[in-house]
Amino acid sequence: MAPEVRDQRAAPRAVVNREFASVEEFIVEYVSNVSRAGVFVRSEDPLPVGTRVALRFTLILDELETLEGVGEVRRAVPPGGAEPAGMGVVFVELTRHSQALLERLLTSPR
């Protein structure tokens, strides 16, 4: 394994999605859109650009499925502006199962 890859995996990570304590908390922080490149996580307290995050969130396909992987915050939108507050997170590493789920989500007829 290349030293750079090893270093990335050892970098501190923050969990973006977690089990939410209340409905109100769920409304404050959630994944609002998904693409092949990454996700936008709505949050009133976005993490700084460059932060590595452990991603885990639920998709609704034929049934509930969980996408898991590692991402990096590339864009942070502070609260109070014209755009919804949150952060753009690019996928750095996804499990094979999560890659397949993402492909199904993005190619299935709606």
Image (spheres, helix red, strand yellow):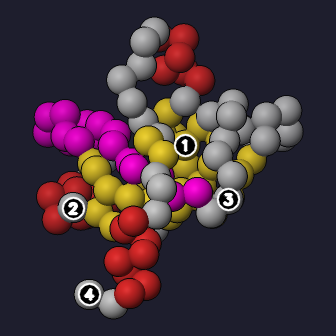
- Disc 2 marks which amino acid? Thr
Q: CA distance from mark 3 to mark 2?
A: 23 Å
Question: Hey, what amino acid is under mark 1?
Answer: Val
Seen from the viewer's position, the closer of residues 98 and 20 is 20
Find out whether the residues at labels 2 and 1 contact each other: C-beta distance under 8 Å.
no
* Cβ atoms at labels 4 and 2 below 8 Å apart: no
Identify the residue position indicated by label 4 in the image. Answer: 1
Q: Position of residue 104 (x, y in %)?
A: 21, 58
Determine the image quadrant of residue 7.
bottom left
Q: Mark 3 against mark 4, which lies toward the viewer? A: 4
Say which label, 3 or 2, has the lower sequence index.
3
Label whose residue precedes the other's in the sequence (3 or 1): 1
Give the structural element (helix, strand or loop) at label 3.
loop
Task: Name the amino acid, label 4.
Answer: Met
Is label 1 in a helix, a strand or a loop?
strand
Please rate how many residues cluster around mark 2, counting C-alpha atoms within 10 Å: few if below 14, some from 14 to 19, many from 20: few
Image spot of residue 4 (x, y percent): 43, 84
In magenta, the rendered stretch is: 51-66
Identify residue for label 3. Answer: 49
Q: Residue at x 26, y 87 (%)?
A: 1
Q: CA distance from mark 4 to mark 2?
A: 18 Å
Give the prevailing secondary structure in the magenta stretch.
Answer: strand
Mark closest to the chain's N terminus, 3 or 4: 4
Vertical placement of 57 versus 104: above or below? above
Foreground pick, 9 / 91:
9
Q: Residues within 10 Å of mark 3 (few under 14, many from 20)?
A: some
Question: Is residue 55 highlighted in magenta?
Answer: yes
Picture disc at residue 41 = 1
Tag of residue 95? 2
Discs 4/1, front: 4
